[in-house]
C-alpha cells in the first residue's frame, strides 16, 4: 500500500510539472485532469472516498472541462514562423 502511495505521489508531481511546462495548452489541461485523478486516487487510499469523489466530480467534471472548452473555443494556434533573427543569420 505504501508503494502504491509513493507511485501515485510521483505521478502527481510529474503531472504537475508537465502542466506547467506543456507547450500546447490542450496537453496542459489533459495533464491537469490526470493530476486531479491521481489526487483522487491518493484520497481513496486514505479512505476519504467522499473527498475523492468530490475531486473527480467538481474539479475534473466542471473546472478542467471548462478550461478545455474555453481553450478549444479560443482556437489558439502555435506560431511556427521563423523569427527575424533566423532570417538575418541565414
Image (cartoon, grey):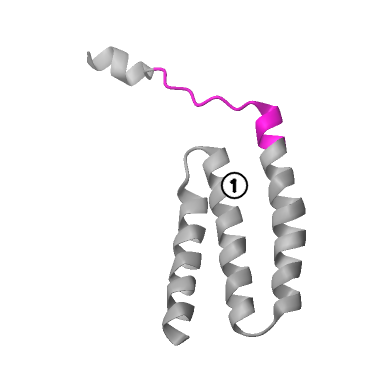
Relative depth, front residue between 16 and 40: 40
* Residue that badge 1 annotates: 29
Q: Residue at x 72, y 36 (%)?
A: 70
Crowding at label 1, few (<14), some or many (≥20) Cα neighbours within 10 Å? many
Q: Residue at x 67, y 41 (%)?
A: 68
On screen, 90 above or below 35?
Answer: above
On screen, 35 above or below 80?
Answer: below
Under circle 1, the secondary element is: helix
Say whether residue 5 is magenta: no
Relative depth, front residue between 23 and 72: 72
On screen, 7 above or below 85?
Answer: below
Circle count: 1
Q: Which residues fall within the magenta stretch?
A: 70-81
Query: Which percent across, then down, holds residue 77?
Result: 55, 24
Query: Which percent across, then down, holds residue 60?
Result: 69, 56
On screen, 82 above or below 26?
Answer: above
Q: Residue at x 62, y 85 (%)?
A: 46
Query: Which percent across, then down, holds residue 78?
Result: 50, 26
Quadrant occupied by the C terminus? top left
Say whether residue 80 is magenta: yes
Relative depth, front residue between 37 and 20: 37
- Say which quarter of the image contains residue 25: top right
Q: Residue at x 69, y 50 (%)?
A: 64
Farthest residue in the left direction? 90
Amino acid at each position: 500500500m505504501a508503494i502504491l502511495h509513493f507511485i501515485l505521489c510521483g505521478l502527481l508531481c510529474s503531472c504537475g510539472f508537465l502542466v506547467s511546462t506543456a507547450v500546447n495548452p490542450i496537453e496542459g489541461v489533459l495533464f491537469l485532469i490526470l493530476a486531479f485523478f491521481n489526487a483522487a486516487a491518493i484520497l481513496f487510499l486514505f479512505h476519504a472516498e467522499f473527498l475523492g469523489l468530490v475531486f473527480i466530480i467538481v474539479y475534473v467534471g466542471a473546472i478542467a472541462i471548462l478550461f478545455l472548452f474555453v481553450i478549444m473555443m479560443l482556437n489558439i494556434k502555435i506560431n511556427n514562423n521563423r523569427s527575424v533573427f533566423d532570417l538575418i543569420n541565414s
